[in-house]
Amino acid sequence: MTSDLRPPALRPCYIGIDLGTSGVRACAIDSDESIIHTCATPLPGPHKHGKSITQEAQLWWQATSHVLSELLSHTNAAQVRAISVNGTSGTVLACDNNGTPLAPARMYNDSYCAEQAALIKRIAPDTSAAHGNSSGLAKLLYLQQLLPQATHLLHQADWIAGKLCGRFDFSDENNALKSGYDPVQGQWPDWLAQTGLKIDSLPKVLPPGSAIATIQNKQSEKFNLAPDCQIISGTTDSIAAFIATGANTPGDAVTSLGSTLVLKVIAEKPIFAPQYGIYSHKLGNFWLPGGASNSGGAVLSHYFTPQQIDELSHQINPDKPTSLDYYPLLQPGERFPFNNPRLEPRLTPRPEKPVDFFQAILQGISQIELQGYNRLQQLGATPPSQVLTAGGGSKNTAWNRMRQLTLGIPVKQAIFSEACYGSALLAKRGYTA
């Protein structure tokens, strides 16, 4: 990439907006993909009533407006060429013809719509990502039944992009996946009509990083953005975080070491294995199959404080593994890399020294990571050639060394893994002069 030698105030810039579970973050990058500024604002918690979890969509727009205004105070708004938005996967809402929400949005972790999920189970192919009480499709069916006058059924990122450009009839392949979209055929499938869903209420689906429209006049004036600033189709928060790492060729894998262990690898063909919770997102010319284990950092946090984790990480010797064979879980049940709802946690025998117990848990999670990538490979995924690591555990150099020895391939901490940075990259790549 050629460096941009123009003064900073005259360089084109691109903005990514991330609607996360607890707040909104925004990031501006220049034409060299260097970060100009990042800012964030919290969101109030959603309204919870049993399995129903909802939130007023206007709260998203208020937070987005706040971070966008703050971000633009640190850059030249007139030089913003494009904006892209990501949102939580499976968060949906129903709107009228003007894009006005008709009821609170149903959140990604809402599992209230069991009746609709049962209908989907009878109709949808097993390989569809639209199964489950918390699927986007189950919630869209519920909202349509509640609000038959709705003309637009949208995902979170679609609606924020619509607020910017005035179009509420577009989505992207990643957000649409859990709403029943078929990424292999590139269309809303015929079986959707059997659920009773009004197909004409669904958005047109574009690949992530496609130009939708230019910013609408009132938002251009509000934020002092150029009238030709382009709004680019977005993605989900997890895919944006993947894009942020820089992984871009088959065999590039990303492990997220958060409270759970999430694996994704770029592959040349899709994999759908519902028995393991594996489905594939389309990403450019490639596919992104992945799975999530119930093991991960939550087990560490259950037994050790952050201070203890830091101290013990300096005491372990990754080159000298313990003889303990753990499968670290907090409660029975695992789906990936093994589907066994009764799998018991294996955290015994417990050694006397805390450092040995700590190292054995890290070893156990590292083995699950290896088994996970082996499972993806068995199902047809491209073998991983390197693993970029995101999440809180990525900063643990001793664990990274242990994982590299276990996996037998390079393991690196991702330089960037913020979803807003990934969306800024999408904005830049989708911009058309």
Image (cartoon, rainbow, N blue to C red):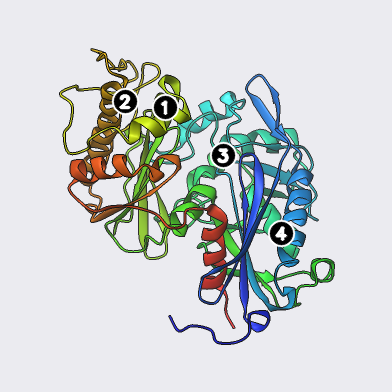
The correct choice, above or below, for 365 with respect to 403 in the image is above
The correct choice, above or below, for 317 with respect to 24 in the image is above
Structural distance between the alpha carbons of marks 1 and 3: 43 Å
- For label 1, the residue is 308
Structural distance between the alpha carbons of marks 1 and 4: 46 Å
Query: Which quadrant is home to the C terminus?
Result: bottom right
Q: Residues within 10 Å of mark 4 (few under 14, many from 20)?
A: many
Image marks 1 and 2: residues in contact by CB distance under 8 Å: yes
Image marks 3 and 4: residues in contact by CB distance under 8 Å: no
Task: Examine the rendering and report whether any part of residue 373 can be seen.
Answer: yes
Element under disc 4: helix
Pointer 1 or 4: first along the chain: 4
Element under disc 1: helix
Q: Residue 57: which quarter of the image?
A: top right
The correct choice, above or below, for 407 with respect to 133 in the image is below
Q: Is residue 176 left or right of residue 403?
A: right
Query: Residue drawn at (70%, 71%), measured in percent from left and top?
Result: 75
Which circle marks residue 162 in the picture? 4
The location of residue 210, given as percent across then percent down, is: 55, 68
Give, as a three-letter code, the residue at label 2. Phe
Structural distance between the alpha carbons of marks 2 and 3: 41 Å
The location of residue 85, given as percent across then percent down, is: 62, 58
Structural distance between the alpha carbons of marks 4 and 2: 48 Å
Give the number of the mark in front: 1 or 4. 1
- For label 2, the residue is 358
Give, as a three-letter code, the residue at label 4. Gly
Pointer 1 or 2: first along the chain: 1
